[in-house]
Amino acid sequence: MEIIIAKNYDEMSKISAGIIACEIRKRHDLVLGLATGDTPIGTYNALVDMHKKDGLDFSKVKSFNLDEYIGLAPLHPNSYNFFMRENLFKHININSENVYVPQGNTDDPEEFCLWYEEQIRKAGGIDLQVLGIGSDGHIAFNEPGSSLASRTRVKALLKQTIEDNSRFFDKIDAVPRFAITMGVGTILEAKKLLLIASGKKKADVVAEFIEGPVTSQITATALQLHSYATVVLDLDAASKLKRTEYYNWVRDNKQLVQKKVGR
Ligand code: PGA
């Protein structure tokens, strides 16, 4: 895992947007996995800026979102579909036919999950998957105890996740109890992973997933099994890490490291 520690949220967002933009410039028809939540908003704003000012071209990019609440229609203001449109899609030139977000109001979630996996396969797999991390260590909605080999499926949400996400809803009872989520196994098949995290409330879980043992109790630890994972943190989220000096040295000596290890 490459660990990049930014000064603050703004720098974290610019660095992660830079990583995404670099992949799009290398491959115009990039298959991009996207995440929702507060954390990636700054990254999406920076990508919108790059589109408007530097002509970053999304016309051939295909996107797959990680998850969606069961029971919310795509136009529901609390749906992740709506979030993506408001925070990214409506500001860039992505083709709506190339946008995939799990359908929360599907009649047959199980069938839908199989179909979603099939669309990822047909697209040739995800090239770069953007991830956040929940305070319980989840990636997408892979709550503690999720199989590290899991595929896209319906998952019951942990009480802690429901409480964390209740800030977006009028009342806690309005937060859906279930979601469709890509599995940990699905995520691990992406060619590259980019996890971003910010703020003091993520500091403990960030230290655990980077420096602790691999466990299904913290599904983000699965990134340790991936051959190309980058983690971009702000100082607060990185504040409980033990090997900060080493991560910073690797980053500051990137050219030397690239020459030696080819990355
Ligand atoms: P957040 O959510 O970015 O709103 O903290 C992250 C997540 O739950 O994956």
Image: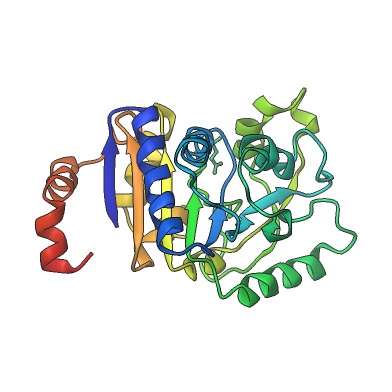
Q: Compare residues 26 and 101 and report the one nearer the observer.
A: 26
Left or right relative to 172: residue 11: left
Of the four image quadrants, the one with ligand 1 is top right
* Residue in the image at 67% along x and 36% along y: 162
| Number of numbered callouts drawn | 0
Q: Position of residue 1 (x, y in %)?
A: 29, 57
* Residue in the image at 68% along x and 60% along y: 98
Q: From this viewpoint, is residue 240 visible?
A: no
* Residue in the image at 12% along x and 46% along y: 249
Q: Position of residue 211 (x, y in %)?
A: 28, 51
Q: Quadrant of residue 226?
A: bottom left
* Residue in the image at 69% along x and 40% along y: 85
Q: Compare residues 248 and 222 and report the one nearer the observer.
A: 248
Q: Position of residue 243 (x, y in %)?
A: 18, 45
Furthest-right residue in view?
107
Furthest-top residue in view?
170
243 above or below 220?
Answer: above
Q: From this viewpoint, is residue 84 visible?
A: yes
Left or right relative to 242: residue 96: right
Q: Quadrant of residue 17?
A: top left
Q: Compare residues 218 and 15 and report the one nearer the observer.
A: 15
166 above or below 24?
Answer: above
Question: How is colour applied across the structure in the image?
Answer: rainbow
180 above or below 69?
Answer: below
Q: Quadrant of the C terminus?
A: bottom left
201 above or below 33?
Answer: above
